[in-house]
Image (cartoon, coloured by chain):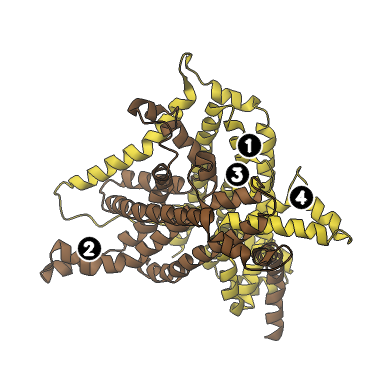
Amino acid sequence: MAALTGLERVSAPAPAARTRPRVWRGVVFLLSAVYFLIPLGASLWYTIYTPGSGVSLAAYGELLTAEGFLQSLALSLGLAVATIVMVLLLALPAMLAVRLFAPRLRVVMEVLCTLPLVVPPITFVAGIGTSLRTGTEVLAPTPFWGTIIAVQNPAFPVVLVLAYVVLVLPFVYRSLDSGLRTMDVRTLVEAARNLGASWPYLLFRVIVPNLRSALASASFLTLALVLGEYTVASLLGYQPFAVWIVTVSGSKGQLSVAVSILSLVLIWLLLLAVSTVFGRQRFGKEKGK
Amino acid sequence: MNRAGSRGWLGALPLLAFFALVFGVPAVALVAGAFTADGRPSLSNMSQSLQGGYLTAMISSVQLSGVVALVGAVLGTFLAYAIVTSRFALLREAVLTASGVLANFGGVPLAFFWIATLGNSGVISGLMGLPSGSLYTFWGLVVVYLYFAVPLMVLAMAPALDGLRPQWREAAANNGATTWHYWRFVALPVLAPAMLGGVVLLFGSAFSAYATANAMVGSVVPLVTLKIAAALTGDVLIGYENIALALSLDMIVVAGLVMAIYLPLQKRSSRWLH
């Protein structure tokens, strides 16, 4: 998953003084268009055209009835929802507390929330796999043994949720941090506390409504990452969506490419949702100035 | 003050505890496993992970990531400059949005896109008469990885290029600078942190990519991520798990060194964006 989402604002350039046509710019755009659009078109053609039987949309129709499609998609969506809930419940109180009461912890938070970017996911899986195996052996005589087995339940592998929370933490941190920057947290909290609001009331009725767009963009990014995640899930032996595509690709080439196209569309929709949410936030901010 | 401090800890505690458990425990297990062989402390895994086939895989991973990072950085910068200076607002928006989508489009679907295009029964490889298997090579992987690397570089460079003030160019021209002088002494020094940061970002994402390579080349091109996966899933002899851990540690060291360059630079370059 990339660290950038395209939301970084690039303003319009000052009107150019030159009117001389720039040939090199056209060449750059043309070459880029060729490189980026051809695989797109070719993949689309690959899914709808079969030599001998002509053009048909069968690959897309077959998707719904394909064995394992709905189960794996449901598993991925379930994992995504659990990850979103968990990462927000962990990160938001921590970030608020650090902001309000312990500014010195801020550096620690920043380091923690950058570490998952440095560590390649595959090495993280290697560590998790080893811990789970050792844990199962060491904890066997204790009551925790049941827990570590339950965490690995293939019907809903909680261990994947835990791993995904770590993997998305940098993106969620960044998103929430920029959201918190736009509001005066301290004043809001002091005002609410003076008026007698309890901490949970304060969190859900004062902070969360102000952070809606940051929370939404964090959730969308998490959803995109979890739906496309392959490395951790496949090496721990589970079969969510991305792993299912690879499994099915051996026998049904067209189907797997069709799913790939759909996943590109999905990423585009999710980013569109994020940027609309972000755009509204920016607009509101500028209006307020 | 003391009470406030303790409340700060209270709010941050769940996250810190979670991190210690889910990130800390695997990290300790990884390091411990990497330095253990046959149940006792040893350096044999580490030394084995830097020999023979494993060393080849590591070198080939670093080469692949290096080529992708450099080529992606150059092409991405040109494209970003073309976008930033373009007069067509619609084109600019479209390319930036597309970059956002493609930079996040990796993993398995990326591999299938290219297999459908240039694979052995691909649409374009048929038209071009490419020899069978030419996608499943080192340079084939480079072409595929650039599909997310170039857009990533565009996203990294566009804000920095946008920060180049036209006044700087005019000031340089008034002082008698040629275009070459302007780029060499004004623009490039300003852009250097962002560019280097972009190169590191590209290197890191190519280096840690596993899903795409696995779906595409299997084990035709030796890569360190593929070796780790093979050792973990027991495709090879049992007892190679600790080799996987040692290889992982090697990877983390390389990625850590690279990130150590990136993080301070990112802070420095962000100064120019505002």
Chain A drawing hue: yellow
The reply to whether residue A49 is in sight is: yes
Quadrant of the rendered image containing residue A61? top right
Q: Is residue B208 left or right of residue A36?
A: right
Residue at the disc numbered 3: A227
Dot 2 falls on a residue whose secondary structure is: helix
Q: Is residue B183 left or right of residue A95?
A: left
Residue under the image location 65 percent in, 67 percent down: B35
Q: Chain of mark 4?
A: A
The count of marks equals: 4
Dot 4 falls on a residue whose secondary structure is: loop
Residue at the disc numbered 1: A244
| Spatial separation of the CA atoms under disc 1 and disc 4 | 18 Å
Q: Residue furthest top?
A: A52
Residue at the disc numbered 2: B166
Q: Chain of mark 1?
A: A
| Spatial separation of the CA atoms under disc 3 and disc 1 | 11 Å
Q: Residues within 10 Å of mark 4 (few under 14, many from 20)?
A: some
| Same chain letter for marks 3 and 4 | yes
Q: Residues within 10 Å of mark 2 (few under 14, many from 20)?
A: some
- Residue A205 lies, in percent from the top left, at 67, 61
Type of amino acid at the residue the image marks with label 2: Pro
